[in-house]
Image (tube, rainbow, N blue to C red):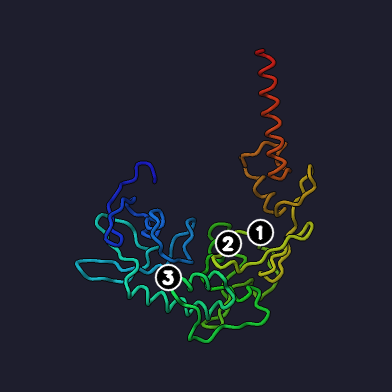
Amino acid sequence: MTEGARMVTVTINKSQYRAEEGETMLSVAMRNGIDIPHLCYEEVLDPYGACRLCMVDHVTCGKRTMMTACTMRAKEGLEIMTDTPEIVRYRSTLFELYLAQAPKSDVIKEMAARYGVTKTRFLKKIVHDDPLGGKCILCGLCVRVCDEIMGGSAIGFINRGPSTVVNTPFFDENPACLGCGTCAKVCPTHAIEIEDQGDTRIMKSWSGTRIALQMCPDCGQYFAPKEMLEEILSLPDPGIVEELKPLCPACRAKVIAKGMFKATFQGSVHHG
């Protein structure tokens, strides 16, 4: 909870809960252990209701209207129902569509199975040599985080309609890619493949884009994209003392631990 935030009372499935005014109803439900399936929600990004799985019934004056829980903001007296028969049927149909869109996604298969959906009536999308392995649902999280958070804009949507895919422009290696791997971290279906080979990070899903890695002078391990690390350390106050800058996180921790032990030992000897 945010300190000083105005609290309101909302109703979910006939039970009342306290929430911060303005927070998403999806986050309220998640915090209280209420299951609302979702794929495109990411806390660091503004919600935009792309996957439609978090659709719930908004109850107003006895009438119900379907709305996405990730874009619905908590306010005093707001009421939703998360698992009405209509909502369950709606989600089941969506899962059939996702099974067709991403036929090789174990994540989708597992989510769909919880709704009793194990097969689809729709034509499956089969693309040979698909760089995303038949797992992409076009939620756009990777595109958004690359653009809005990392400022790279290295990937985007290509083509239209059923031919739409996500990749680098013209399916070429893209030097704008930072190699940070944030896209893979936010991908809900684990469709993005990245492989480190020696001093190089290969963005296998993004047209094989190759990124040079920085080597730690202490342990000799390659641990981070070189160009990205240089940009971070060039900031006016990166929050890292000079001697620790070239080290990997593990070696930094060792140096800090040794320094703390030395200071403690010397202090105990001095006072002893």
Q: Distance of mark 2 from mark 1, alpha carbons? A: 9 Å
- Where residue 54 sits: x, y (%)? 40, 67
Using the numbered discs, state the Cα–Cα distance from disc 3 to disc 2 in whole angstroms. 23 Å
Q: Nearer the viewer, mark 3 or mark 2?
A: 3
Tell me the residue at 37%/73% (across/down): 88
Residue 261 in the image: above or below residue 51: above
- Mark 3: which amino acid? Leu
Q: Secondary structure at mark 2?
A: helix
Mark 3 or 2 closer to N-term?
Answer: 3
In-front residue for pair 46/35: 35
Q: Earlier in the sequence, mark 3 or mark 1?
A: 3
Q: x, y (%) of residue 177?
A: 66, 62
Question: Residue at 41% of width from left, 74% of height from top?
Answer: 91
Question: Label 2, on which residue?
Answer: 146
Residue 178 tag number: 1
The x and y percentages for residue 218 are 79, 42
Q: Which residue is mark 3?
A: 53
> Which type of secondary structure does the marked residue at label 1 adopt?
loop
In the image, residue 226 sits, relative to residue 35, either above or below, namely above
- Note whether 41 is above or below 18 in the view shown: below
Q: Amino acid at mark 1?
A: Leu
